[in-house]
Image (spheres, coloured by chain):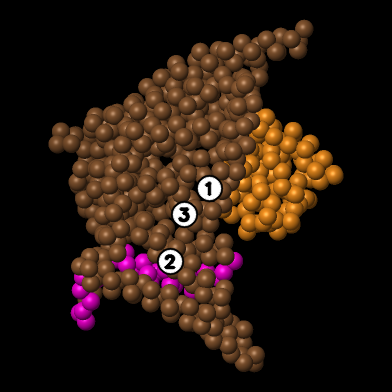
Amino acid sequence: MNFNSISEKIEKHILPLANKLSSQRHLKAIRDAFMSLLPITLLGGVASVIGAAPVTETTTNGFLLAWAGFASQNSLLLSWINALTLGGMALYICMGITYFLSKHFKMDVFIPMMITMFGFMMLVCNPIELGWAGSSIDISYMGGQGLLPAMLVAFIGVELYHYMREHNWGRITLPPSVPASLTEVFAGLVPAFLTLSVYVVIWIIFNALGTNFTAFIYSIISPALSAADSLGFTIIVTLLLHLFWFFGIHDAAFGAVLGPIRDGNLSINAAAQAAGEVLPHVFTTSFWVYFVIIGGCGSVLSLAILLITSKSKQLKTVGRVGIVPAFFGISEPIIFGVPLMLNPIFLIPFLLTSTVNGIISFLLLDSGFIAKTFAMLSWQMPSVFGAFLSTMDIKAPILIIVLILIDMLIYFPFFKMQEKQCLAMENEETE
Amino acid sequence: MRKVMLVCNAGMSTGILAKRIEEASEGQLQVRAYGEAEYADNLDGVELILVGPQLRHQIPTIKKNVTVPVQSIPPKYYGLMDGKGVFKEIKKLLEM
C-alpha cells in the first residue's frame, strides 16, 4: 500500500470523527464559550502583567521602580480585576454555554440565562454571612477550580428547561385574548421554577453531606487535572493535534477538552501570582500558544524563514505569503501552500517540531529555570512577546528564539528534499 | 454587489483571503469571513458559503443549517491566499 491510499483511508475515518466532535451540541457549546472568553482573559492578562513589575531588591532602574510602586499602590484594584476576569472564568463559561446551547435549541436565551446564573451563584459560590448589616460570599471557586461545576450547572439548567418546554410540561395555557409575550412567560413559569428547584435540591443534598457541589466535583477531577499537567500529556496532546492538522483538520475539534484544562490551569496560576504564591501549573493556554506552537500548529514560523530563502520560485512565494501570518500564529497559508498537509516528506518534522518545543519548554518551566505562565494576551500575539509578557521572565523570549532555531534545523533536511522536487518541476516547465 | 461568506475556525485566516477576493473582484463581490460559531447569524443576502479546508469536516453540518450552496476552498488557493483563483471559482459557482 502506498502513502496516498493509506492517507485516503485514514481521512475517510477522521473527517466524520472530526465532524462529530465539532457538532456534538455540548462539546460545541463548551468550545464556543471558551473562544468567546478572549476579552475577559485579555483584561485579566493586562492586569496581571501590570501587577508583576520585574523588580528585585537590587533594581535601580527608575521606570521599573515607578512601575512597581504603581502596582503596589493599586494592588487592591489589580487583584479585584484579576478575581473578576481570570479568577472569574467559570462565571463567563457558565453564561457562554447557556447562550450557545440555548441558541442551538433555537430558544430565547433570557430565561435560561437567569436560571443558570441562579444555579451558578447557588452551587459554585458559597455563602459566608448573609446578614442585615452586610453579606459576604466566597467566590474562590469562580476561577479554574469551578470550571467543570459551572459547565454542569449550565448543562443541567438549559437541558432541563428545554426538555420541559419541548414536552409542554406544566404549561399554563391562557385565553387567546392574552398578549403573546405574556403567554410565553406563563408557559415557561413552571419549567423554570422546577429547574431552579433542582439546584436547590442539589445544594441541600451536598450540604447534608457536609460539603458543597463544587468542592466535591473538584476533589473528584483534581487527580485527572494534575495528570494532565505533565510532560507525557503534553507530548500526547501535541502529537494528536498535529496528526489532525497533518490531515488539514483544525484542532478546534479538541477545544472542548483542552479549553477547560488549559484555561483552568491559567486561571489557577493567575490567582497564585496575584496572591504571591508559587505557580502550580505548566500546561496553560499561554504555554501552548507561545511555547509549543511557535507560528501556529506545525511551528511553521521556522519553516517560513527557510522558505523565503528558497531557490524554488514556488516555495519562495509560499514563504512570502505565509511568513507574516505565521509570525502572528496563523499557520494555514504554509500548511496548505507548501503543502505540508498530507505531504509524506513533511510528516516527521511536522509532528516533531512542536513536540520538541513542548518537551524542552515543559522541562525548563517545570524545573523553575524559566518562570511559569500567569497571563494570556492574545492567540495572535507573536510568541517572542507572548512568552515574555505571560511569564515576565526575560529568559522566556530567548528560549523561543532558540526553539525557532532548533525547529529550523529539524525542518531543514526535509525542506531541502521538497525544494529539490520543486526545482526539478520548475526546470521542466522552463525547458 | 453579490455577497459571499467565508467560514473558518475564528475568521482569522479566511479574513486575509476575503480581502484578496474582494480586491480581485473589483467591486463585484462583498466577501466577509466569519468564525464557525457566528456564521449562522450573518447569512443575510449571502449567496454562497466557502469553507476553509481546515474546517471541511464541518461542511455536512453547515449544509444542514443553510439553504445556499456550501463549498470547500481548494487548499492550493488557500495556501497562496490566491484571491484571483478563488474569484474565478466563485464566478463559475455564481454564474457571473
- Which label is found at residue A30? 3
Amino acid type for the residue under numbered disc 3:
Ile
Q: What span is colored magenta in the figure?
A: A106-133
Left or right of A106, for residue A430: right
Question: Which callout, 3 or 2, points at the residue further toward the start of the chain?
Answer: 3
Residue B21, picture quadrant: top right
Q: Provide the residue designation for mark 2.
A: A156
Q: Provide the residue designation for mark 1.
A: A21
Question: Closer to the camera, A411 or A59?
Answer: A411
Magenta run includes residue A303: no
Q: Residue at x 14, y 36 (%)?
A: A57
Q: Colour of chain A?
A: brown
Q: Position of residue A387 (x, y in %)?
A: 36, 35
Q: Position of residue A253 (x, y in %)?
A: 52, 44
Question: Closer to the camera, A12 or A419?
Answer: A12
Question: Closer to the camera, A189 or A36?
Answer: A189
Labels in figure, total: 3
Residue A94, picture quadrant: bottom left
Check chain identity for marks 3 and 2: say if they share one. Answer: yes
Identify the element where label 2 is drawn: helix
For label 2, the crowd category at 10 Å Cα-Cα, with few meaning under 14, some 14 to 19 and many 20 or more, is some
Q: Residue at x 18, y 36 (%)?
A: A56
Q: Residue at x 66, y 48 (%)?
A: B60
Q: Quadrant of the C terminus of chain A?
A: top right
Q: Nearer the viewer, mark 3 or mark 1?
A: 1
Question: Which callout, 3 or 1, points at the residue further toward the start of the chain?
Answer: 1
Chain designation of label 3: A
